[in-house]
């Protein structure tokens, strides 16, 4: 039994340490097809090599959120196996597209620790990076999680709380090399709305809903080699429910937002995100968005839109928090990201 | 909310108009693997590159019905989002194989409109074409659907009912370039029965049954980027049922017909088809076929068989319609197609 | 109806006959992606082309158990369509990796027959071989099954019981050409435990559990073109249960054993195996292993570990059989195999 991985506990994290996560992964057209089977993914840049070439890329890359899952999944055995909650994300940036044939691995640098006052757990902040086979960083983001202590009597570490940006500055967003939206085909993309058609504070009800199934979320979660047992083992909880991987809700929400944001092709920055309430099989996911900010980029015809993406299980669209400032029970995800779209 | 696609209504269709459907799609070995996971697909030409080469092709193409789904799926946001019923198909022909790496897009030409007497809806006929990245038409077919009106007071258009062939003439079938069945390997294909062994009026009970699941039909329908919400959202109907995409039944029926029609390798023509009754999760699909006609082709060793393919949820095989001329309640699909097989 | 395949019955097998199974299959990155979606597959050699190259291979091959399924699936229509039970495996050896792009077909040689005393069925032994497009044997194994007779009055054949090795001798294991574990990266592989760290009689509880779903086992079973109807048709049994393909349990067990055996990268030999009790949707599979033997190989840095792999539906780990010598009811699989790992 000594050979199985018990995961890390709060006292196992040291500021400045870099954890090299296991199981690199080569992606192919198989991952793309599965992403399209598991989610209603329709953004043309990730569906068609021809469309991507017309936008200056050499081929259609792996969906940005799929790339996120590949990088994130590797961190689970080292970061979240004993986590009580995944608390937040910040400073996420997609730095290079992931192409079919690329091999991705991940590292996480411990940048913050803070023991909880109850002495039983603490918060750990890590900056995770995904690298391809050329050692290029394809994605980086900070996340923090509440992690159990193995030994409640272990001494509390010195508290270090990282100074994180509330929002990735638009000037720090990285546009994929060669991207050019000046010949963008709005008809093939599916909607006529360009960057200039969106206004800050505008809200969009994406209308469609998807009822989620056990087989689907487990297949998705395994595809990214996320091994957290709460997603797979129905005997762990008294109610026999499997907790759905929060990333499954992110992907479902992002792809459902196509209807109204079909031209928000590329996810370039992750400003923040909260998994407000859990998702279970049988829930019907609906989605709305709010335009939070707009920015130009140096790339030809490419603008950036900062968006709030909210996934709910029913409830009124555009409702988020109650008078007490807490998320309403039907809100599952509140994500804040930057998308690139044609100007 | 103005940014989401409400779909087209009956009064939005004009005779002669060509609709360019969105979201082109590049297919790969991923789509092939998923097709084999979602359906009991065993036709050797679509399973083995070596078998396909032995039949004169350069590699194994995407399954013909999968190609149909890719083309059809793109039309849904423009044609069937407000459809009350998908009424029929005609004049379908597969003109070029779809190879892994091909990028497919679709257009539909409006060729018929007829307002219903109730003034609330009408029938729209479109001729849909799927094109690859070389602008070659890979597939064309006519379908018609009953579509709601947005405004019941909108004036009725002049009725145009297209003159459609009851059957694709065998001389109009297109055999894939290079196809040659003279060295056909019946052992590897799985059955000894050649074109000459089938007789008109012969019926075949394909014996096997498959009980369908929510996760499977949703994955299949999403894979083809068919976004019709009735397939995904269990909250739309009082009974909580999701209506299964008719194409899922077509694929299940065609692949189940392998047992008795293993050598009916290629689907070359679609003469007609009716989704007689809906399919829901939990239904067990069984299939029978009837030989309707036979024809020779100019290609070496290649014959054509016109087949009726009937999918049922239980019930006696070989029963189709009641004394009233209506489909019996257990009949879900009645499809009329041309297959190519070794002579 | 004469055209459908009724399967072979006991009296249809003749000693020395070689059956050429139908439907060759070309595999791609699609099969790899699906294997990772259907099972918690994490062995690095099958996940990363870069990791495989660092171990002396040209790329990441198809998972060995997936290769087994491809070969096995083809045999079902000829061997197990009328089988009452799949009784055992022996003398299994993986002889060549299966690479993406390879086309696999199977043959089975009848090497044993023994009619049961009740005269209604008998045991058939076959030696199955999987070949690639170069006619190289990639895998061979013996299995035996109890098969119904078509005609109980058919005369009993002369009994031939093959003399099968209890264990594949370690000197007969075939190491993939070029395999070299001297630069093996234990960090990327996920665990530090090398061949020398495992002791004979050591047992490992792999801890994690997976609750299985109908959609998943059907997709897996179809992917390997296994057509046995008991896996798909819920109307065949009074309880409406579909019997899960034993190979699904093998794959789930092998991939769950990653946690504790992450470096047991390659399955090289199959000594034996028993499907002790059936698996149904809703069962939660847990797994434990026992080290049965150790051996060196001639390849640089490569050792062999003989392992017992036991899949259970709950119950105490490390329990296998009752006082009566019979498998306990919670034991589903008892597999005996050789794995290759870094020394």
Image (cartoon, coloured by chain):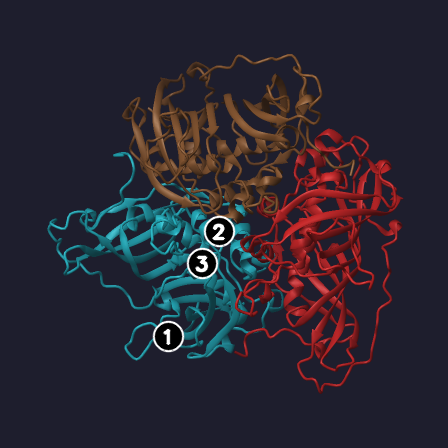
Chain colours: A red, B brown, C cyan
Nearest the eye: B171 or A49: B171
Can you give x and y, in whole percent of width and height, for residue B156 in the image? 67, 16
Name above or below for residue C141 compared with residue A342: below
Label 3 to label 2, Cα distance in Å? Answer: 9 Å
Which residue is the site of mark 3? C281
Residue B233 or A43: which is nearer the viewer? Answer: B233
Specify whether residue B183 is in view: no
Quarter-of-image position of residue A45: top right
Q: Which residue is mark 1?
A: C320
Where, quadrant-wise, is the N terminus of chain C in this rendering?
top left
Q: Earlier in the sequence, mark 1 or mark 3?
A: 3
Q: Specify whether disc 1 shares its chain with disc 3.
A: yes
Element at badge 3?
loop
Callout 3: 10 Å neighbours few (<14), some, many (20+)?
Answer: some
Mark 2 is surrounded, within 10 Å at the Cα level, by few (under 14), some (14 to 19) or many (20 or more) other residues, namely many
Check the image and report above or below for A330 versus A289: below
Q: Secondary structure at mark 2?
A: helix
Residue A216: where, in percent of width, then height? 56, 52
Point out the residue furthest to the bottom here: A153
The Cα atoms of the two marked residues, 1 and 3, are separated by 22 Å
In primary-sequence order, the first of circles 2 and 1 is 2
Nearest the camera: A257 or C190? A257
Query: What chain does badge 3 belong to?
Result: C
Mark closer to the observer (1, 3): 3
| Residue to which mark 2 is pinned | C215
The reply to whether label 2 and label 1 mark residues of one chain is yes
Label 2 marks a residue whose chain is: C
The answer to whether the residues at label 1 and label 3 have Cβ atoms under 8 Å apart is no
Residue A340 at what x, y percent from top left?
A: 80, 43
Can you tell which mark lies on residue B51? none
């Amino acid at each position: 039994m000594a050979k199985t991985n018990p995961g890390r506990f709060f006292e196992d994290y040291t500021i400045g340490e870099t954890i090299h996560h296991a199981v690199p992964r080569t992606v192919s057209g198989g991952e793309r097809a599965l992403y399209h089977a598991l989610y209603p993914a329709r953004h043309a840049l990730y569906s068609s090599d021809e469309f991507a070439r017309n936008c200056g890329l050499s081929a259609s890359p792996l969906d940005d959120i799929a790339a996120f899952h590949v990088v994130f999944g590797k961190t689970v055995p080292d970061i979240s196996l004993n986590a009580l909650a995944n608390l937040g994300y910040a400073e996420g940036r997609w730095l290079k597209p992931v192409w079919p044939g690329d091999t991705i691995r991940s590292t996480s640098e411990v940048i913050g620790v803070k023991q909880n006052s109850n002495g039983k757990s603490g918060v750990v902040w890590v900056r995770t990076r995904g690298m391809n086979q050329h050692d290029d960083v394809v994605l980086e983001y900070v996340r923090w999680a509440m992690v159990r202590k193995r030994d409640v009597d272990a001494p509390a570490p010195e508290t270090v709380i990282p100074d994180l940006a509330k929002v990735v500055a638009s000037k720090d967003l990285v546009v994929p090399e060669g991207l050019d939206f000046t010949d963008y085909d709005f008809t093939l993309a599916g909607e006529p709305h360009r960057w200039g058609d969106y206004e800050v504070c505008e809200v969009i009800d994406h209308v469609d809903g998807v009822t989620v199934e056990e087989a689907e979320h487990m297949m998705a979660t395994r595809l990214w080699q996320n091994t957290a047992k709460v997603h797979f083992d129905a005997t762990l909880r008294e109610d026999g429910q499997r907790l759905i991987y929060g990333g499954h809700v992110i992907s479902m929400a992002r792809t459902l937002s196509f209807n109204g944001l079909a031209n928000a092709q590329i996810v370039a920055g992750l400003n923040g995100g909260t998994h407000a309430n859990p998702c279970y099989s049988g829930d019907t996911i609906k989605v709305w968005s709010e335009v939070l900010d707009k920015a130009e980029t140096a790339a030809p015809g490419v603008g950036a839109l900062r968006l709030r993406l909210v996934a709910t299980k029913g409830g009124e669209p555009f409702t988020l928090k109650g008078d007490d400032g807490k998320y309403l029970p039907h809100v599952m995800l509140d994500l804040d990201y930057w998308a690139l779209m044609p100007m």
